[in-house]
Amino acid sequence: MSTPITEAGIGIRRGLEGLRRDAAALARAPQAAPLARDRLEALVDLARQRTLVEASVAALRRVDEALATLLAPAGR
C-alpha cells in the first residue's frame, strides 16, 4: 500500500541516488576538456534531482503538519 509518507521517502531516496550518480559523473569527467555533453547532462540532471528532493521534502512536511493537526488535543 502506497502512502504519502512512503512516496515522499521514495522521492527523497531516488533524488539523492541521482545526485550521487551525477556527482560521480562530473568527478570522472576530464576537467580540462570543454564542457562535454556528459558533463552538461550531469549538471542539468543535478538540478532536476535537487527539485525532486525539494518537492519530496515539501510533501513530507505537509504530511507531518496534517498529522500534527489531527493528533493535537482539542482546544489547542
Image (tube, grey):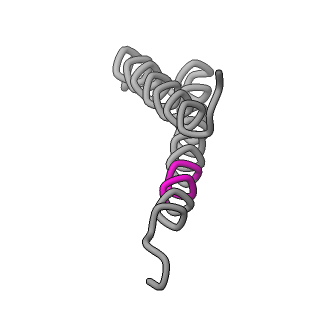
The residue lying at 37 percent from left, 25 percent from top is 31
Main secondary structure along the magenta-highlighted residues? helix
As for residue 56 lying within the magenta part, the answer is: no
**56 left or right, relative to 71:** right
As for residue 62 lying within the magenta part, the answer is: yes
**Residue 12's x, y, as percent?**
49, 34
Residue lying at the far top in this picture: please name it: 28
Q: Which residues are magenta?
A: 59-64
**Residue 64's x, y, as percent?**
48, 55
**Residue 75's x, y, as percent?**
48, 85
* Number of dots carrying numbers: 0
The residue lying at 46 percent from left, 27 percent from top is 13
Residue nearest the viewer, comparing 27 with 1? 1
Residue nearest the viewer, comparing 21 with 33? 21
Q: Is residue 5 above or below residue 28?
A: below
Q: Is residue 70 above or below residue 15?
A: below
The quarter of the image holding the N terminus is top right
The residue lying at 47 percent from left, 24 percent from top is 22
Residue nearest the viewer, comparing 53 with 9? 9
The residue lying at 39 percent from left, 24 percent from top is 20
**Residue 71's x, y, as percent?**
47, 61
Residue lying at the far front in this picture: please name it: 74
Q: Is residue 19 above or below residue 58?
A: above
